[in-house]
Image (cartoon, rainbow, N blue to C red):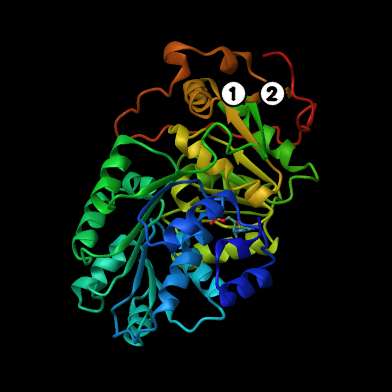
Amino acid sequence: MPFENLNITEPLQRALAKEGYSTPTPIQAQAIPHILKGEDMMGIAQTGTGKTAAFVLPVLQRMAQEQKVTAPGVPRVLVLAPTRELAAQIDQSFATYGQFLRFRHTAIYGGVNQGPQVRALSRGVDTLVATPGRLLDLMDQGYIKLNGVEFFVLDEADRMLDMGFANDVRKIVSALPKKRHSLFFAATMSRQIGELAGRLLSNPVRIEVAPQATMVESVEQRIFFVDQNNKDVLLLGLLKQKQLKRVLIFTRTKRRADKLALMLSKNRIRANAIHGNKSQNQRTQALNSFKMGRLQVLVATDIAARGIDVEDISHVINYDLPNEAESYVHRIGRTGRAGADGTAYSFCAADERNYLREIEKLTRTRIELMDHRYHSEHAKNAVGAAAKPAPKKSGRVPRSPRHNSVRRSGPRTSHNPSRRR
Ligand code: AMP
């Protein structure tokens, strides 16, 4: 079904054609008609499904149906996003899809000087994409009033709660007009998310695309059982393979991200790390280098990776498995985007064995095992106390193992998943 069948107006069709998008993704096909009718919506969709355009297109269309002169700092559309990267990216989507419409858009987020953001607001703004902290800041300073908001979108609500924004979101919502059109997106459903949605939405339609079991079908997944002290050599071997062109690697902590990026650089692999302790400029720079192909590897923590929209990520590597199974789904959704094929490799040491069990339960799949020279039966068979991380000793960060013998070659069989399981 082409976009024309969704009653998208000509200026938006033209922008879509220019971007080379002719067919709506499933979330777009399902969500757009409801949003155009003015219905509140709860969408369960992971990133990579095309969910941004699923709300940006119909919201722009409805906004453009009624031309209004906006007062400084009084937006008509408010989108809340958990991270700066995601906010900037959604704002970019408004710019891209709305390139043939007349409207003003801006994004505001913390970590950068507020001056340019305040100036943009004072020129008048129709669509505002914001992270909660900076929005509340600028509201407190009197630069933004939410009493003109007609459309409210809460994106990645589950991540918003994970990051501790529940109170901020509540405060923001209480400043919105009662009569408004609200849309709510989350990657996964939970009781907390249901409660939040219940407070924000009135009589919503619920749309769910690509349930957790199937959403990652375009991603080839493999598990590598490996002892912690062999993760570095295993990784170096893998990165020598030609097909690992643009690789996003996840670690569990910022410190491990930095250490890993340093280890890779020392081994002449073009790598950098992004995480919450880096300045916005450093993050933008690293991300741009990665996009342009100047870096082969970007090492990231879960939160920093939210909203990274880099096309053609050939491989996601989970150097550490995430302690929340949902994060696995988010992580591997960074590759295989919009129908492209991608590969996700996950390293699992003994103390991560239970994390893997949780992931397989959530995704209802058994991830295929990769046979390689550092294979650890100990990790594969770990149960009980051995299958979870040792309790933290007070005040001390556990030391990660030293990496040595980096010149050894990589896995024996790169494309030969074992049938042993
Ligand atoms: P999102 O889930 O919003 O992060 O979008 C994932 C990627 O899909 C982005 O790079 C979009 O530009 C791209 N995309 C969105 N809509 C379409 C479409 N209808 N056809 C092809 N690609 C799309």
Does 198 appear above or below 20?
above
**64 with respect to 259 (left or right):** left
| Among the 4 quarters of the image, the one containing residue 277 | bottom left
State the image coordinates of residue 297 (x, y, percent, origin top left).
Answer: 65, 51
CA separation in Å, label 2 and label 1 = 8 Å
Does 187 appear above or below 365?
below
Closer-to-camera residue (326/214):
214
SS for tag 2? loop
**141 with respect to 345 (left or right):** left
Q: Is residue 281 visible?
A: yes
- The quarter in which the N terminus is drawn is bottom right
| Mark seen at residue 227 | 1
Circles 2 and 1 in contact, beta carbons < 8 Å: yes
State the image coordinates of residue 87 (x, y, percent, origin top left).
Answer: 43, 63
Tell me what residue is drawn at x 35 percent, y 84 percent. Answer: 68
Q: Is residue 265 visible?
A: no
Tell me what residue is drawn at x 33 percent, y 28 percent. Answer: 393
State the image coordinates of residue 289 (x, y, percent, origin top left).
Answer: 63, 63
Residue type pointed to by label 2 = Tyr
Closer-to-camera residue (2/281):
2
Q: Crowding near pointer 1: few (<14 within 10 Å), some, many (20+)?
A: many
| Ligand 1 within 8 angstroms of badge 1 C-beta | no
| Among the 4 quarters of the image, the one containing residue 207 | top left
| Ligand 1 within 8 angstroms of badge 2 C-beta | no
SS for tag 1? loop
Residue type pointed to by label 1 = Asp
First of labels 2, 1 by sequence position: 1
Does 97 appear above or below 121?
above
Q: Which residue is mark 2?
A: 374
Tell me what residue is drawn at x 23 percent, y 62 percent. Answer: 172
- The quarter in which the C terminus is drawn is top right
Tell me what residue is drawn at x 38 percent, y 81 percent. Answer: 116
